[in-house]
Image (spheres, rainbow, N blue to C red):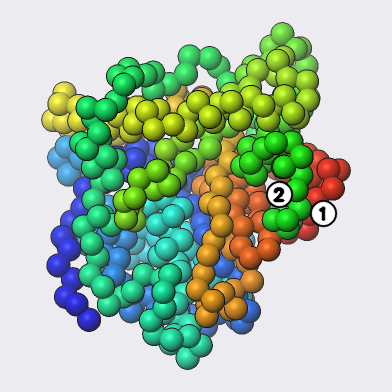
Amino acid sequence: MKKNNTPTWFRLDTSAKIYPARESVRDTAVFRVALTLLKKVDPVFLLKALENIRHRFPYYNVHLKRGVFWNYFQVNNNKLLVWPDTPYPCERIHPLLNNGFLYKVKYYDKTLALEIFHGLTDGYGATEFLKCLLHQYLFLLGEVPEVLLGVMSIDEEPSKSEYEDAFIKVYDQEKDNILVKKRSLFGTKHIYQIKDKLLPHGFYNVTTGIFTVKDIKKIAKQYNATITVFLAALYLEAIIHLQAKQVKKKKNHRNIALQIPVNVRNFYRINCMRNFSLFVIPTINPREVESLQDIINQITLFMGEHLTHNHLLTMIEDNCSLAKNQFLKFIPVDVKNLFIGYISNTMGSSQFTGTLSNMGIVKLPMEIEKHVTAVTFLPSPSPHEKCSCGVGSYKDNMYMTFGRSIEPAHIEQHLFSRLVQLGVPVTIKSNQ
């Protein structure tokens, strides 16, 4: 095994800087990737597996520390823990109760889950970490070989590209190629927000709809849409119907918008294990659409205009503006956090009604695949949008998981009913 020569502390990446400032008991900034196994999880072997991979991910095994001007991560040498799962996922992670770690590995019956602070990584990084943990766990049980292609090897030293700030790297490489130099970070129009009362602290209702990839591909093709665009359109359609119920006067109806994360690794071949995602926010005026096809057409047009090399560079420049700002550089961290938190919780959160995060296809080595029956992804709870959705496909099935901080299941009921109506059978699972 190679000696780990990575640093003992890390700067927060460009996207991560927002999360310590906005994190709270309601806005936990903790998301979840979960695997369903064929056999019941053994916590003793699970902890041993976690200990075995620890050195491979020093940038995840950290404390969050407060510096004079910026927060930073310092390598955490405390004892690792694994946790029994709880009825309500994505709870706030209290460092004192978790030996300072910013993630939790959880287990219950056949479920193995990773809940992780978004300041550490995005969905891609979390999935790769969980795949490595699962591989080591199954190896300790004697179920799989010690080395497998398609899983990060614990015998390799972490490369610098895994923990460097990928946004800064791309910006420095391409800053001379940015054609549009100015773009407003925040929209000026008020976006409709779901009106329902929030559940008590810590409650997070989860509903997963399961349907076949074959069925959803077929119906999306009929509408000349990608799967992501088709599901986003159904989501926006559900919000349109909800606004009509909650706001009786049409003249008071606002635009609706959906935040859709984009994995920038699909555009730049950078081996980044920290945050490297951006967001596009298609917006719909309810008065300008009369059918699902109208919504699909607008989203398709929006995505075509925004998922371009130049627009991505512009968003990367916006992302890097905080880190590059010479005025903010020497402002104390507490003042920065107040400013970032205020902007995020007001102008930032007012830009969209909900979130749809599609992880795409989750692939596992054949030797591991036969031990896993399902993969689900759940975004963190938010007091602003109140209902978020994570999507992923594994083998023949697609898993669409809604997490909501309110009691009524407005969005998921409408969306899953529409899928059934359109000829896509849906199996429902819930924590309620």
Q: Look at 16% across and 75% down and name the residue there.
A: 3
Q: Look at 51% across and 69% down and name the residue there.
A: 364
Task: Report whether 420 appears left or right of 121.
Answer: right
Is label 2 in a helix, a strand or a loop? Answer: helix
Task: Report whether 149 appears left or right of 416.
Answer: left
Is label 1 in a helix, a strand or a loop? Answer: loop
In which quadrant of the rendered view does residue 191 lie? top right
Counting from the top left corner in percent of width and height, residue 139 is at 44, 85
Q: State the residue lying farthest toward the bottom.
A: 142
Q: Going from the N terminus, do you reach mark 1 or mark 2 first?
A: 2
Q: Look at 75% across and 12% down and name the residue there.
A: 250
Mark 1 — residue? Answer: 425
- Within 10 Å of disc 2 (Cα), the crowding (few <14, some 14-19, many 20+) is some
The residues tagged by marks 1 and 2 sit, at their Cα atoms, a distance apart of: 13 Å
Amino acid beneath label 1: Pro
Front in this rendered view, residue 202 or 77: 77
Mark 2 — residue? Answer: 217
Amino acid beneath label 2: Lys
Task: Report whether 358 appears left or right of 83.
Answer: right
Counting from the top left corner in percent of width and height, residue 375 is at 59, 63
Q: Quadrant of the C terminus?
A: bottom right
- Within 10 Å of disc 1 (Cα), the crowding (few <14, some 14-19, many 20+) is some
Counting from the top left corner in percent of width and height, residue 119 is at 35, 48
